[in-house]
Amino acid sequence: MPKRIYVNPTDPLAEAYRNALITHPGKFEIVENVSLSDASITEIMPAGTLATWTTSYFVADAEIGAVDLENKTVEISVEQHRAFSNDLRLEESMSVLSALGIARLDGLSITRTANSLAVAGFHAGSRVSLVHRHSTVDQLYISITDVQLRVVLNAPLGSTAMAAEISGHSADGTHTVRPLYRSVISRWLGNH
Amino acid sequence: MSNYGIGFLAAGPVAQSIHIPAIRRYSDQLTIAHIMDIDAGLAEHLGTQHNAKWTTNEDELINDPNVHIVVVGSPNAFHASQIVKACEAGKKLVLAEKPLATNEAELEEIRLAAEKSGTAIVVGAMHAFDTAYLRALEYWRSLQVEVESIEVSCYLPPNDEFVRLATDLLTPTDPTAPIGGPRPTAPSAVAKITGGILGLASHDVPLIREFATGLPKLDYAAGLNPWGYLLQGSVDDKTLRIIGLLPGEWQPHWTFRALGKDASFEVEFQPSYVLSGSGKIRVTVGGEVDEFSSELSAYEAEWEEIIALVSGAKKPRYSLARVSDDLRFSLSMIEQLEGLVNENA
């Protein structure tokens, strides 16, 4: 018997939740009235945001460990169309860094402008930069690079289960691209 | 149709791999007339190869009446004096490889000399001449939309890798002699980032300044290993991030992005030394995407601009005042490095 799930239509991720729920027809059923539901989608999902969940899956998929974050250049862009306060941008930025495995940045620098925010600092010999800003397309970009390693995530943060892509370069110059066709919400729902 | 003689001050990879292949496309209008390099063997070899005079003396080249266009590809410290000499010799045009100068005093010397002689000054920031970029920029301006964030993300294999792929380079006859004379044994982090700003990042500054006219305020600056820079801050209330990194044999990635809530201007550049078409530009407004590209490389477009200027067919796209302001943008970032860069990090 599928679990009956209510999705608040005013939730910014409502469409993303719906698109993910219908990929598990045997497990979940969307209901339009909270009184008819077994649970709300927000009760099922973990704490965090789409950007932090996507980062967590990236860490798992690309098998990024602490050593992979040492002495690197780490470039991150969180880009979303909807409005954010700079406080929320900062909160989400730090959550993304934490999900990546960067609990704190030494020499933390924060740049605030009217509609975007940038943080930078050091972590385990790595130079880390994250910009959180408005864009026409909702997406997350993470690049971890040094001479031996280059791993890049290009992931949508949109409402549909668009493909994310992890690409890497090994030390011999081999370039591999790994597409991921299922949204992180769908993957979470499939595993929980 | 007139034919203009070109003199190269320095015969290294930029002359051999970029300009000479590009100008051969315009051989009915351009002739390689004179090659100068401090390495006599290299100057002779390249000059002979192209049926041009050769010399180790810059004055000999600058005073050659058959040289109408001087390409200044020497080390940064010589740019200003050589540009001034070329102006004083009445040359029609100087193509100055970046940077145009290294400080405000040199800029003023160039301004006085160029205004007196009427010599056109072009700075070799090739992306700024990319025809697809310029068409996209014209379209963008017609939209009258604003951006809130600007960034450059540039990951390139070392130059040697591209030079090797593009050209069977004539190497210095004395391979132990570093180009431009001896270099500091252990440059400071500030010196390395300064080199990056006046070098690789100079390509990006003209584009940044199409979207922000003020001077940058840096909040963070760091050198990147093995070579590169991370510059982060703001300009005109837009976040600004400039990353340049030569990490290894990775696939090149060189993008310029100006982003807003409802519109974005994004460029994927060809790497340096590559004559294989223009950058690829995407302009997104309200969900509609327009893409721009051209078969003409930015280097070739730069030389088409030069031909138009020396023949009097058009006025400079970028005035000396404009390229000077571009340099001031770079110098402003350099001035801020001392207080930001942690030499021990």
Image (cartoon, rainbow, N blue to C red):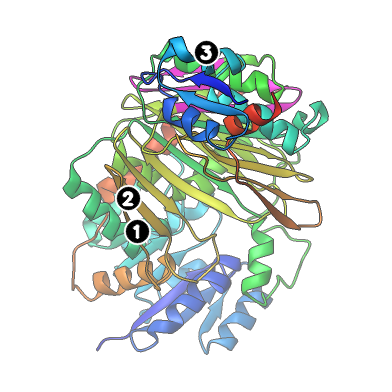
Total numbered labels: 3
Residue B173 visible somewhere in the drawing: yes
> At x 43% / y 69%, what residue is drawn?
B297
Instruction: Please name the residue that numbered disc 3 is placed on.
Output: A91
- Asked if labels 2 and 1 touch by Cβ distance under 8 angstroms, the answer is yes
Q: Quadrant of the N terminus of chain B?
A: bottom left
Magenta range: A109-132
Q: CA distance from mark 1 to mark 3?
A: 35 Å
For label 1, the SS is strand
* Rendered image: mark on residue B283: 2
Name the residue nearer the viewer: A43 or B253: A43
- Residue B55 in the image: state x and y as whole percent: 56, 76
**Could you tell me which chain the residue with mark 3 belongs to?**
A
Q: Is residue B252 left or right of residue B71?
A: right
To which quarter of the image does residue B311 belong? bottom left
For label 2, the SS is strand
Q: Amino acid at mark 3?
A: Glu
Q: Is residue B339 left or right of residue B235?
A: right
- Residue A153 in the image: state x and y as whole percent: 62, 40
> At x 19% / y 63%, what residue is drawn?
B315
> At x 62% / y 29%, what residue is drawn?
A27
Instruction: Please name the residue that numbered disc 1 is placed on.
Output: B291
**Could you tell me which chain the residue with mark 2 belongs to?**
B
To which quarter of the image does residue A56 belong? top right
> At x 32% / y 32%, what residue is drawn?
B261
Q: Mark 1: few, some, or many residues within 10 Å (few <14, many ≥20)?
A: some
